[in-house]
Image: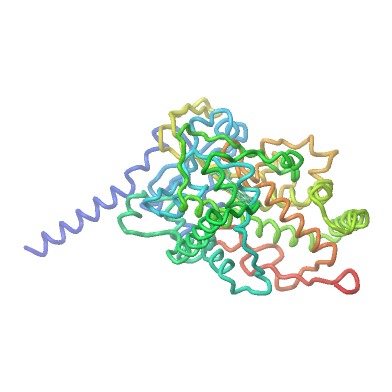
Amino acid sequence: MGVFIALALFLLALYLAYRWSIASYEYFKLRGVPFVKPLPLVGGMFPVLSGTVFIVDCISEGYRRFRASRFSGLFMFRQPAYLIHDPELIKKIAIADFEHFVDHSFKFSTKMDPFLGRSLFFMDGLRVGNDVMTSISFGIDVDSVKDPQNDFFQNGKSFTNTEGIQGFKFFLATMIPEYIFTFLRIRLTPAPVAQFYETIVTCSIKSREEKNVIRPDFIHLLMQARKNILQEDQSDRNLESAGFSTVPEHLQSSTSDLVEWSDLDITAAVASFFFGGIESTTTMLCFTVYEVSLLPEIQAKLHAEIDSVQNNLEDHKLTYESIQKMKYLDMVVSETLRLWPPIGLTNRKCTKDYIMKNNDGTQVTLTKGDIVQIPIQSIHRDSRFFPEPMRFDPERFSDENRHMLNQDAYMPFGLGPRNCVGSRLALMQAKCILYYLFLNFEVQISSRTDVPMQLDKRSMGVNAKNGFWFHLVPRREGV
Ligand code: HEM
């Protein structure tokens, strides 16, 4: 008898667990929104968990399936989320109706991770703009090519690692409720990494204050911000555009709260440079070199432009202005960011009720906490906006052709007040590296690189499964 009761209780528990795991699945049906059918508990995320589909493609699946719809639904585990297909609606959400969506959905509170919770990506509606993020350095020189074991490189790698267990933790953190993370005491930033940055920055702040040292770097700007004496650098006015993809940064805070910056806040802001910048800029560089190495005509044009700029440089020193004038380089980089956006998906969290209308007249009301996903990559690869979307063609961005582009459909750095704060920095950095690379070398693809590209489906970022391999052939003697 006892066995039967135990079995009955077990089956009841199993049944209740099953009911709980599908409890939210009527959400879109009730609202008349087309949606990707979920599996119990994992929702639509099974392909990611099993490593068969890249996370960006998985979350954007509704875009492919429901082409006539302005938006569709998906379940990230049990959590419903809206996928917005229509660039015009995305623009409304991110810009005109920004007050309804001031946050990203992946907010980590300081309770969940004292370090990441303070980083710029995950903060509530606060923005630190232009000057702060474009002046980057910790004020310390390292050479990671000569010394790949240096602490900055190693800790940066651990901090930005989006693979393996660390990647999985990030993946879960974006989807399961915060209290579970806090309860299980799971931290996203490895403690030694957080400790490393905190010690460096805290010591640096202390020593600067004691010795009255001013260094024109990122920490200095944040120290000024803390004292409320940060001013826009006039010289930045000349640096308005680093290329077609540049997005305007927003200096104002979207909340009226005055934020007090502790040393830990400053440390986390400095470290978000690594988090936000390193991986995405590297991805942009790798894919640019990959595409150019496959297309000799494009490489020849790039060589010609770079050679001509180099011949006209005073003292052979590259300047910001000369990079800004390089139209072809900009076209190549813009096209890379279209075809291979390093961040192929962004999101917003609804912070105030919002009504959206679908093409079939259905109307839905989003309430506080609802999540919208913005499928940057799918829009960039949609033939309705970019004909022959899988073809790498920088000419789309030429002076003659760019007026034909639907500018709303091009958003490699996101849009609105929560767009990327590092677009100019990223573009300038990448263009400098590409300039010197193609000035000195002809780049040939190695047979070790997959053509066509095979992405690593288990990675959170856009990575080549088997890496990028090239042959560098010197273009002149002595290189
Ligand atoms: C090619 C390089 C890069 C790409 C493609 C990129 C792309 C993006 C995208 C798509 C977003 C989300 C924007 C949105 O939701 O509207 C974002 C946010 C952000 N990016 Fe970048 N990014 C790059 C480099 C950088 C660099 C170098 C930095 C740091 C200096 C940086 C710092 C940030 C920060 C802090 C945010 C969050 C802004 C906020 O939440 O308000 N990014 N980036």
Q: Depth check: give the residue in front, 468 or 391.
A: 468
Q: Position of residue 59 (x, y in %)?
A: 52, 49
Q: Is residue 209 left or right of residue 195?
A: right
User: At 51% from the left edge and 44% from the top edge, which residue is drawn?
Assistant: 226
- Residue 250, located in which quarter of the rendered image? top right
Q: Is residue 131 left or right of residue 228?
A: right
- Is residue 146 among what the camera can see? yes
User: At 70% from the left edge and 43% from the top edge, which residue is drawn?
Assistant: 246
Q: Position of residue 27 (x, y in %)?
A: 39, 38
Q: Position of residue 404 (x, y in %)?
A: 78, 35
User: At 62% from the left edge and 59% from the top edge, which residue is drawn?
Assistant: 139
Please state, as top left, top right, bottom left or bottom right, where the C terminus lies in the image. Answer: bottom right
Farthest residue, direction front: 211
Q: Is residue 157 left or right of residue 5?
A: right
Q: Name the colouring of the figure.
A: rainbow
Farthest residue, direction left: 1
Q: Position of residue 224 (x, y in %)?
A: 56, 44
